[in-house]
Image (cartoon, rainbow, N blue to C red):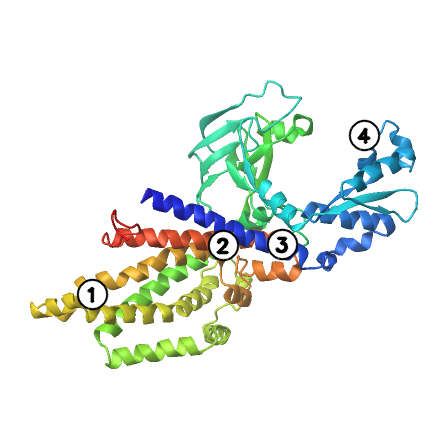
Amino acid sequence: MKRYVLGRLIRSIISVCFVLSITIVMVYTMIPREKIFQTDTSLGKYKGDALVNYKYNIWKDLGYLDFVQPSGICAVSENYNSCVNGGADFKDLVADYETRGYTYVPYENGVTGFVTRDYPAYELIWNFFSNLIEVDNPWAVQDAENEELQRSYYITTGSNGMPAVACSGCKHKYQLYIDSNFPFIHQNVISLDFGLSYPTFNGLETMDVINDGQGQVVQIEQTFPSGVTQRSALNQYTCEYKQTSTLDHLDTQKFTDNYANCKNYMESPSMVGTSYLFGIIALIIAYVIALPAGVTMARHKDRWQDKLGIVYVNFMIAVPSLAFIYFAKWIGRLFQMPEKFPELGFGDVKSYILPLIILALLSTSSLIIWMRRYMIDQSNSDYVKFARAKGLSEKEIFNKHILKNAIIPIVNGIPQSVILCISGSVITESVFAIPGMGKMLPDSIKALNNRMVITLTFIFTALAVISLLVGDLLMTVVDPRIQLTAKKGGK
């Protein structure tokens, strides 16, 4: 089994990398890169050579190309001032760059210019994966003004009183900690760097856009390492090392070390937390409705219970999801339910009722029909005929024998349903203006936010692949007769 799981994990990683590679090549080579500026309001602030520099710097930051300005070209010149003004050294250095595949582009002033080189497809892929994984460690921080910095891991108590693993010398102070925010157990040892978001959420890391809280800053009463107790918005679990030269009196007032660069507490959950909250509650409601309904329909096959259930399933399948959502909104309006989530926000139960009911009901039809099919299929098996021959009641046969076997395929899909709740619901979140993950991918594609598209592709692909493996493993737990590996001597 261990070899099987390891093999599946390796194949899963290869599959995710393959999908990501295709996505990278598509977004970087098939879409004209000029289009990424279509929603950039900063573009109008620049003209002439400044505009050229701005665009090429953005393209460089996003990984399209390498871009070297005169100051960079002349950095190795002994006659720097002469070089940056178009001297003989400048021409020689440009010629050297051209031999390495760079193209020289003159500025409007005609004196100097810059060199640039587009990355080919294989280099785009290599640059992405080579910078993807960051491992924090006690030697990550280099501060010439703090030569006595201790470098070690240690166990401590966090700001919420829970035990945590901390580090001195790492980029992040807290390496492993627990709090009340999804996914509750957090780590900063290994992080994924997908780069900066652009043009939407400009300047923020794509993972921060997804994982950080939303809304207004919230202050809470807390005690800092220096012993000072006050209301503050700083989340001490997110504190990163701050260079000694940049520490100010507010930092030294609260902290006893250089870990003073902290994020703020926000009033609302993150995008991923919001989608997961809606998704997991709706999923529970869907299973609570669908599984008993499917069992009831199978037990009363061709009777009024079954026929009524078939009518419901056909209705839910036939009606477009968008039409059903607006129909449910119309009914909700009769009960004075909010039409948009932000009207009442996260703090009011009414904000959740309509979206949860809609998400749950949209998932019930497939669950009901498959549960019914599995139950009916099992009811024709030989072991059921034998149980009837022994005189067992139909209720006992269905509950103790048929259900146990029919539930196995349903169990296989539970991990996928649970894990993929993170991805959110595109239509429901859009209609109710829920600030979750569902709208992120289509919005990012529309805005040509390449880094965000790649980030979300990775997340959704990785979750889908992992959920399939977990589903297969869960089946073996429910029914030990199921073997995922061939027995010795088997074919």
Please name whichever residue, 107 or 122, is drawn nearer the observer in this view of the structure.
122
On the image, numbered disc 2 is attached to which residue?
A: 461
Is 302 above or below relative to 190?
below
- The amino acid beneath tag 1 is Ile
Query: Where is mark 4, residue-wise?
Result: 76
Q: Earlier in the sequence, mark 4 or mark 2?
A: 4
- Residue 244's spot in the image, x, y percent? 66, 26
Query: Which of the two marks, 4 or 1, is nearer to us in this view?
Result: 4
Q: Are marks 2 and 3 in contact (CB under 8 Å)?
A: no
Residue at image coords 45%, 60%: 349
Q: Which residue is mark 1?
A: 402
- For the residue marked with disc 4, what is the amino acid? Val
User: Marks 4 and 2, how far apart in space?
Assistant: 44 Å
Rendering quarter of residue 100: top right
- Name the amino acid type tagged 2: Thr
Of the image marks 4 and 1, the number of the one nearer the N terminus: 4
Query: Foreground mark, 2 or 3?
Result: 3
Residue 268 in view in this figure = no
| Residue 170 as seen in the image, left or right of residue 123 | left
Q: Are marks 4 and 2 in contact (CB under 8 Å)?
A: no
Q: From what the image shows, is residue 251 above or below residue 481?
A: above
Q: Earlier in the sequence, mark 1 or mark 3?
A: 3
Q: Are marks 1 and 3 in contact (CB under 8 Å)?
A: no
Q: Which residue is mark 3?
A: 25
Q: Is residue 491 left or right of residue 14?
A: left
Amino acid type at circle 3 is Val
Nearest-to-viewer mark from 4 and 2: 4
Q: Residues within 10 Å of mark 3 (few under 14, many from 20)?
A: some
Distance between the alpha carbons at the discs numbered 2 and 3: 17 Å
Q: Nearer the viewer, residue 373 or 151?
A: 373
